[in-house]
Image (cartoon, rainbow, N blue to C red):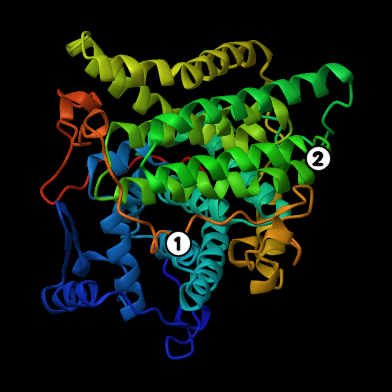
């Protein structure tokens, strides 16, 4: 068991706090009384965990379970599935639970602007990094999957190029070790996704091309993205939140068109940072809306499509940072419309929606073509080893963490949004805010928009699957007892 000692964890009395809603607090109090955490069909036995839960832990756990309770969030967001897998695996590896708590606090801070949630994100992130480093020093088949999941969650929170590149290199290293050894991972789809998303030669330190052909391609792709947003907006009439999200996406693309293409990997990271945050958080906010429907999925499809299109515009980091994580949820959305249209091909509203999805479909086809090209060009060796991963984790741990250097919590002003080429980790960093929803006027839905988003299992392609244990957790087979060590 990879337990974190008390000396390694800051005092609970001095760590930041976060107060949940009264409804959530009542639920959490019940959890503390019964020892069972339950939201919807998701259940976790707290008595089987490797450490005691503080009040802050319980509040963050509530948000994890709340975000992952619906089939929509599991399929149409990037991170909720990883959280379910991470919670199941964290019983023996507390550093993984801490990584999940850190991301949850990061998400809450982004959505609410809570200073307390921001402090919790730094607190748990630091604890998780220390635990991850200890696990790397004793890397084995028993903790390989936990190391992979924790590295993934922490890389999703990285707000500067060096930390993200170090963690992503570590993920590449762990994936190589799992694949080369023949180890039967309990999370094979995560291994497959990361193997596909992170180049074997990562990090690529080369600069983006400066040729006229590349610049013309850069401008052409961004103009396609902007034109697609323009075409979608009339269809969203009366949908205040969706309009603001698409206007914000269009404004982001417009500002990319207004600056020179990013050259170094760090510049590319900085240009994509705001979009990457949206890819994590906008889908959750959209699916939480009480009037979500199929049109809501089209809005998400456009976000994921823009993320997908960034691969060739930011060649050093685009796939590992934005494009790879966009593919799966975008394909899930397209599959839903395909199945609905196949069941009712004469539905005029579905036909119109299918027309609006031409932009995402073209991007997916181009992405698939690039994937086939990559298979023919893949290098035969890894560029990382575990000694390098250990050294890089030490570097991340020793960095001074300051709220002022995190663009996730920077003040949002129009003056900050003008220069898309500023570094993401400076006080003048570009930051594009998620639209404020509190003052949103009532949404007027026309009959053509009123199809509710309530998807049956067969519509998600789950008709023949039966993998859930009582309580909603997915069961993954454990390694056979007595299996030989894969790593020493």
Q: Residue furthest right?
A: 211
Tally the numbered discs.
Answer: 2
Q: Could you say which quadrant of the image residue 437 lies in?
A: bottom left
Where residue 118 sits in the image (x, y, percent)? Answer: 52, 72
Mark 1 falls on what kind of element?
Answer: helix
363 or 236: nearer the viewer:
236
Nearer the camera: disc 1 or disc 2: 2
Please give the residue where the numbered disc 2 appears in the rendered image.
259
Query: Which mark, by number, is residue 166?
Result: none
Residue 465 visible (yes or no)? no
CA–CA distance in space, label 1 to label 2: 28 Å
Please give the residue where the numbered disc 1 appears in the rendered image.
111
Against 126, is 74 above or below? above
Residue at 29% x, 72% y is 58
Where residue 208 sits in the image (x, y, percent)? Answer: 82, 30
Locate the N terminus by quadrant.
bottom left
Q: Residue furthest bottom?
A: 13
Q: Earlier in the sequence, mark 1 or mark 2?
A: 1
328 or 114: nearer the viewer:
114
């Amino acid at each position: 068991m990879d337990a974190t000692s008390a000396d390694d964890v800051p005092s609970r009395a001095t760590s930041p706090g976060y107060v949940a809603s009264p409804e959530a607090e009542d639920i959490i109090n019940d959890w503390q009384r019964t020892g069972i955490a339950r939201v919807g069909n998701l259940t976790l036995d707290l008595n089987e965990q490797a450490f005691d839960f503080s009040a802050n832990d319980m509040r963050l756990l509530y948000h994890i379970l709340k975000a992952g309770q619906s089939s929509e969030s599991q399929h149409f967001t990037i991170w909720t599935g990883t959280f379910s897998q991470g919670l199941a695996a964290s019983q023996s590896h507390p550093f993984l639970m801490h990584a999940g708590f850190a991301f949850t606090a990061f998400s809450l801070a982004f959505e609410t602007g809570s200073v307390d949630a921001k402090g919790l994100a730094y607190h748990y992130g630091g604890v998780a990094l220390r635990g991850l480093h200890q696990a790397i020093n004793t890397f084995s088949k028993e903790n390989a999957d936990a190391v992979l999941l924790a590295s993934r969650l922490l890389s999703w929170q990285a707000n500067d190029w060096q930390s993200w590149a170090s963690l992503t290199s570590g993920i590449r290293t762990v994936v190589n070790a799992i694949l080369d050894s023949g180890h039967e991972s309990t999370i094979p789809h995560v291994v497959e996704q990361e193997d596909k998303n992170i180049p074997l030669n990562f990090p690529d330190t080369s600069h983006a091309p400066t040729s006229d052909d590349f610049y013309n391609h850069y401008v052409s792709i961004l103009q396609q993205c902007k034109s697609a947003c323009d075409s979608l907006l009339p269809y969203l009439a009366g949908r205040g939140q969706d309009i603001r999200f698409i206007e914000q996406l269009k404004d982001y693309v417009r500002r990319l068109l207004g600056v020179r293409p990013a050259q170094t990997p760090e510049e590319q990271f900085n240009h994509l940072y705001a979009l990457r945050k949206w890819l994590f958080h906008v889908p959750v906010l959209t699916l939480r809306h009480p009037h979500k429907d199929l049109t809501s999925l089209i809005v998400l499809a456009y976000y994921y499509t823009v993320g997908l299109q960034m691969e060739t515009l930011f060649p050093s980091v685009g796939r590992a940072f934005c494009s790879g994580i966009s593919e799966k949820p975008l394909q899930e959305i397209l599959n839903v419309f395909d199945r609905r249209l196949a069941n009712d091909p004469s539905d005029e509203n579905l036909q119109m929606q299918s027309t609006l999805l031409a932009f995402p479909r073209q991007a997916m086809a181009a992405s698939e073509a690039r994937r086939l090209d990559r298979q023919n060009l893949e290098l035969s060796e890894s560029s990382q080893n575990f000694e390098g991963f250990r050294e890089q984790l030490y570097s991340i741990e020793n960095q001074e963490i300051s709220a002022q250097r995190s663009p996730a919590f920077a003040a949002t002003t129009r003056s900050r949004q003008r220069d898309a080429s500023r570094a993401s980790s400076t006080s003048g960093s570009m930051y594009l805010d998620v639209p404020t929803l509190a003052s949103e006027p009532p949404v007027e839905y026309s009959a053509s928009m009123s199809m509710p988003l309530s998807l049956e299992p067969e519509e998600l392609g789950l008709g023949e699957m039966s993998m859930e244990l009582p309580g909603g957790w997915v069961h993954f087979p454990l390694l056979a007892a007595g299996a030989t060590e894969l790593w020493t």
